[in-house]
Each structure stands twice: as C-alpha cells, then as structure tokens.
Image: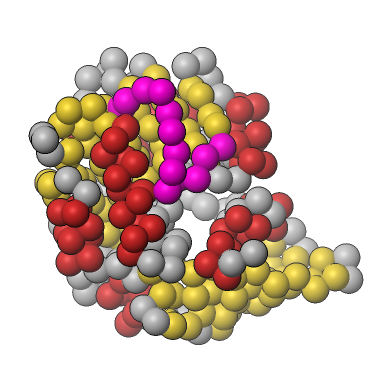
Amino acid sequence: MKKEDWFKNWFDSPYYHVLYKNRDKNEANVFIQNLVNWLQLDKSSTVLDLGCGKGRHAIELKKKYKKVVGIDLSKKSIDEAIKIAPKETHFSVHDMRDFQLNESFNAIFNLFTSFGYFSSMSDNLKVLHQCNKHLKAKGLLIIDFLNAEKVKSELVQREKKTIDSITFEISKKIIANNVVKNIAFKDNGRLHNFQESVQLLSMDDFKSLFQKSNFRLLDTFGDYDLQQFNPISSKRLILVAKKLET
C-alpha cells in the first residue's frame, strides 16, 4: 500500500474510533446549528456529508434538511452509520477523489479536517472538481479544516492518552508542509503503529484550489461559533465557497 494511503487502514481500524471516541458531540451539534443558521438553505435541500465517518454530522444535518447523503472511504464506518440512519439519510462507500453519485446537491459539507490527506495538490483538486460536479447551480461547499499557522506554532511533539485501557503514544512532526502524527500502542500483547498525515494548507492554498475548480470563496470563520478567522489565533479554518456559473 502506498505511504500516502495511510487513511485506508487507519480509518477502518477499530482503534481509530477508540482514540477519538471522546470527541465533543455537543460541540459538533452546535457547529451544525450555527452553520445552518448562517447558510439559510431551504429545508427542502439535499446535502452531502463528504467524509462522513460514522455519520454523527449527517444525522444532525438530517434534522435540518429533507435529504442527507453521506459517503466515506471506510466501509466499517459506513456500516455503523447505516445502523443508526434515519429515513432519507443514505450512506455508501466512496473515495472522495472519484465518487460518482446519481444526484446533485444544494450543499456539500466536508467537516472535522476531512481534507488534505493526500501527497499532492492534484488530488485535492480532484476532490474539489468532484464536489463542483455534484453541486447544483450556485451550490455551496463548506470545508472545516485545521488552522495551519496555529498548528505550526503550537505543535505538541509528544503525548500519551489512555483510553479503554489502551495507552496511545503519539508523536507529531512537520515534514514537507504536512503535519505527521505517529500513533503507537499495545493491545493484547501486540504492538500497533499507525500514521496520520495532513497537508498544512493555508488560506492562499485554498483560494488557489477554489479558483482552479470553479468556486468562489464567500466567507471564512475561525471556530465553531463562526467567529472571524484569525490566522494566528483561530482554532479552525472554516471556508464557505460557492459554485460559479459556467
């Protein structure tokens, strides 16, 4: 398997969900509500959760919109999402670089740093071209990404987390403008080692990507309360872009 395809194994591993099990669901729900209020999409809208994982965001989106579709590369995550999916919420396995769905959407949500996993900008462009292709006229793309400058300045190089009796030893470093996280742990006497790698994309990088994929950046936010983005201090880089007419 290619090194850059680290996500294929890690996202399908049960340990991924152990390590990140304590994600703040209330924070995620507040974020969705804030986005919905800002976007002012009609309740009859059809939306896509791109990189949906087990569907926690998709389920909240379904409370706001008529139809929600969620796609993810991890079959195990999709299987879990299907178990808890309400009506008119549809989940399936796809690679975000080449997904083909027989419908178009009013908005596409790409949340919780589900972008920039690849080794090249060309793969990022593939994702954005697919998003553009699957959006209706003047459709919206929402990307919730890390703030690269803050990550660079506040990188914690080593930490340990014990969850469900498993001690995860985590080390981080920046290599070729990627933040690379190594995750090592033992379970039942067996040593495991996984890696995450995310491109440290700046605002200028996204502007360039949007221009090349026929999007116009509408607004940016720096946190889940949708406060103004500050490249030095903001926790997140949240971008709202609009599909341009051709």
At a point 26% along the width and 39% down the height, the residue shown is 132
At a point 32% along the width and 32% down the height, the residue shown is 134
With 85 as the anchor, is 32 left or right in this view? left
Compared with 232, 25 (above or below) is above
Q: Nearer the viewer, residue 180 or 152?
A: 180
What x and y, as percent, mark residue 88? 47, 16
Give yes or no for residue 100 being in the magenta stretch: yes
Q: Nearer the viewer, residue 140 or 61?
A: 140
With 21 as the anchor, is 121 left or right in this view? left
Compared with 180, 58 (above or below) is above
With 125 as the anchor, is 162 left or right in this view? right
Q: Nearer the viewer, residue 169 or 180?
A: 180
Compared with 109, 151 (above or below) is below
What x and y, as percent, mark residue 118? 44, 63
Whether residue 100 is visible here, answered yes or no, is yes
What x and y, as percent, mark residue 212? 19, 54
Q: Residue 46: which quarter of the image?
A: top left
The stretch in magenta equals 93-105
